Image (tube, grey):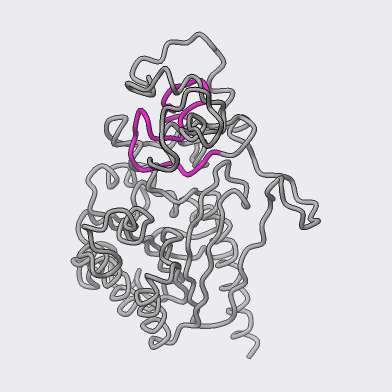
């Protein structure tokens, strides 16, 4: 029987990244997050894993050994986690009153906490995930710090932005990954799906659409959606916007006969409506009645639909209110994308072990 690989998870949330890693053959030995509800969700979904509810700054070797025992931390195969992303998000280009990257106290504590855990745990591989904005030139100093620290510890590193839609997720969601290995090479996963507008000549199936992912959850067109009404004071305008479009449809530049908004004076997701014939746009961490993606039937998405668009199982447990559950799902890495990375990490570890044994 093949021995399962072992991982430690940081900033674990409700477990999107961990689910993909588990599906790829890793056992989650220990996990950590500061959020009380995310901790509850993770504990229910990963009953076999030790969980520390608290700051990454307090996730020390002594504390973790007290949870799982010193032997359990020997020869860990993978450290995985996505430090909270707001300090590296696009919104910081607009919120100039807020610091970005490691100038933000959250960014400094979480990135430093990840790297400190990497130092004392010294796993065979690591995976650090964040928003695509971490790869922007303005954040290069932080990325250089991550790479330099890991390389000084002996890791061979590479990084890449991946689109979840390219890996069978019904959602256009760009995520940034840094991978480091002590032994062997890491080969990035190849896309399994393609943009239908692509002209690269590949014969991959096209992106999975939102309609194919969630249509069966909304079979009654006349169903009442109390609590899911969208648009607020702009509801009558939302109803005019075609599926797959946003508030820009109601501007003079788009030729609308009765313009309601100025060109690019709102967030792009304002009154953004899903198309059943396209993947969803990125699911945000905040549930809103006017910031999309909203359902093509002019309502807020249901939690069951948001889980589907993120590729969580239908029965995935989420603690808290609807808004609190939404935040957990919106902050998560789509498990299907996580598994694509996990499969490659497992393969890399297997090849490295075989090479060492042969030597």
User: Going by the image, does 287 lie left or right of 280?
Assistant: left
Quarter placement of the C terminus: bottom right
Up the image or down, 309 lies above or below 351; here it is above
Q: Main secondary structure of the magenta part?
A: loop
Depth check: give the residue in front, 350 or 327: 327
Q: Residue at x 55, y 49 (%)?
A: 336
- Residue most extreme to the top: 222
Depth check: give the residue in front, 83 or 287: 287
Question: Residue 205, how many percent across, how many down?
Answer: 74, 46
User: Going by the image, does 168 lie left or right of 4?
Assistant: right
Question: Residue 320, how many percent across, how many down?
Answer: 27, 34
Quarter placement of the N terminus: bottom right
Q: Is residue 33 part of the magenta span, yes or no?
A: no
Up the image or down, 156 lies above or below 78; here it is below
Span of residues in magenta:
280-304
Q: Quadrant of residue 169?
A: top right
Up the image or down, 133 lies above or below 319; here it is below
User: Going by the image, does 325 lie left or right of 298?
Assistant: left
């Amino acid at each position: 029987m093949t021995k399962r690989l072992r991982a430690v998870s940081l900033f674990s949330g409700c477990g999107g990244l961990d689910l993909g890693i588990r599906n790829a053959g890793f056992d989650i030995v220990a996990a950590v997050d500061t959020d009380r509800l995310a901790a509850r969700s993770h504990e229910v979904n990963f009953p076999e894993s030790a969980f520390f509810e608290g700051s990454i700054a307090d996730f020390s070797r002594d504390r973790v050994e007290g949870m799982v025992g010193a032997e359990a931390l020997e020869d860990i195969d993978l450290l995985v986690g996505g430090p909270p992303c707001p300090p590296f998000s696009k919104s910081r280009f607009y919120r100039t009153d807020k610091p970005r990257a490691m100038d933000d106290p959250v960014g400094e504590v979480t990135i430093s906490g990840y790297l400190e855990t990497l130092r004392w745990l010294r796993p065979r591989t690591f995976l650090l995930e964040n928003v695509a904005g971490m790869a922007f030139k303005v954040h290069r100093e932080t990325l250089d710090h991550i790479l330099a620290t890991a390389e000084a510890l002996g890791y061979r590193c590479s990084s890449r932005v991946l689109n979840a839609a390219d890996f069978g997720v019904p959602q256009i969601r760009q995520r940034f990954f840094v991978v480091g290995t002590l032994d062997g090479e890491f080969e990035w996963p190849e896309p399994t799906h393609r943009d239908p507008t692509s002209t690269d000549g590949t014969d991959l199936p096209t992106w999975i659409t939102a309609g194919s992912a969630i249509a069966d959850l909304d079979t009654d067109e006349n169903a009442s959606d109390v609590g899911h009404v969208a648009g607020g004071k702009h509801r009558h305008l939302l109803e005019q916007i075609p599926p797959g479009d946003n508030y820009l449809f109601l501007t003079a530049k788009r030729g609308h006969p009765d313009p309601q908004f100025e060109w690019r004076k709102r967030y792009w997701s304002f009154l953004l409506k899903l198309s059943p014939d396209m993947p969803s746009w990125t699911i945000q961490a905040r549930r809103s009645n006017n910031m999309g993606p909203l359902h093509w039937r002019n309502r807020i998405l249901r939690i069951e639909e948001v889980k589907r668009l993120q590729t969580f199982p239908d029965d995935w447990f989420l603690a808290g209110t609807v808004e609190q559950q939404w935040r957990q799902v919106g902050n998560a890495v789509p498990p299907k994308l996580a598994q694509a990375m996990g499969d490659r990490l497992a393969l890399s570890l297997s090849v490295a072990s075989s090479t060492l044994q042969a030597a």
